[in-house]
């Protein structure tokens, strides 16, 4: 579980991320989940843009993604979700305590 200082650190890092993933109007597919899992392993911190055609609640989507990916929700701003998952084998981001 991330504390407030760690979330603040990750929010700062996320603001400079150029890597974006998109969720469209279709439901979450297994291929999308697999792609996001690989992205979290490679980068630990990802931004997901939710397209306007997506009709469900974005907060519910964030919770669903975090559960399915076993990741932490860093923030949800507008139609953007930021997720973090520590790579246990090769951590890239050193979190403050």
Image (spheres, rainbow, N blue to C red):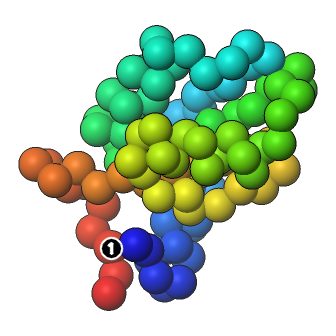
Q: Is residue 1 left or right of residue 51?
A: left
In this picture, residue 4 sits left or right of residue 86: right
Q: Which residue is mark 1?
A: 95
Say if 35 sits above or below 15 in the image. Answer: above
Position in image of residue 78 (x %, y %): 84, 50
Percent across and percent down for residue 40 are 37, 39
Find residue 26 and report its horizontal and vertical position in percent.
Answer: 73, 13
Asked if residue 52 is positioned above or below residue 91 in the image, the reply reads above
Q: Residue at x 64, y 47 (%)?
A: 62
Which of 27/14 is in front? Answer: 27
Quadrant of residue 96 within the rendered picture? bottom left
Q: Looking at the image, is 25 positioned above or below residue 6?
A: above
Would residue 34 be seen by someone viewing this image from the given angle? yes
Q: Is residue 66 left or right of residue 24?
A: left
In which quadrant of the rendered image does the C terminus lie? bottom left
Task: Give whichever of 43, 17 is nearer the camera.
Answer: 43
Identify which residue is drawn at 47% across, 24% down.
33
Q: Is residue 16 visible?
A: no
Q: Nearer the viewer, residue 1 or 86?
A: 1
Indicate the position of residue 50 as horizontal and vertical percent values.
75, 32
Of the 4 image quadrants, the one containing the N terminus is: bottom left
Instruction: Give SS at disc 1.
Output: loop
Instruction: Report the residue at 27% width, 68% height from top.
Output: 94
């Amino acid at each position: 579980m991330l504390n407030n200082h760690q979330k603040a650190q990750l929010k700062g890092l996320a603001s400079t991320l150029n890597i974006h993933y998109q969720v469209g109007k279709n439901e979450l597919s297994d291929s999308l989940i697999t792609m996001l899992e690989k992205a979290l392993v490679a980068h630990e911190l990802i931004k997901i843009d939710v397209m306007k055609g997506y009709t469900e609640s974005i907060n519910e989507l964030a919770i669903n993604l975090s559960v399915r990916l076993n990741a932490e929700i860093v923030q949800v701003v507008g139609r953007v979700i930021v997720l973090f998952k520590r790579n246990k084998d090769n951590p890239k981001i050193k979190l403050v305590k």
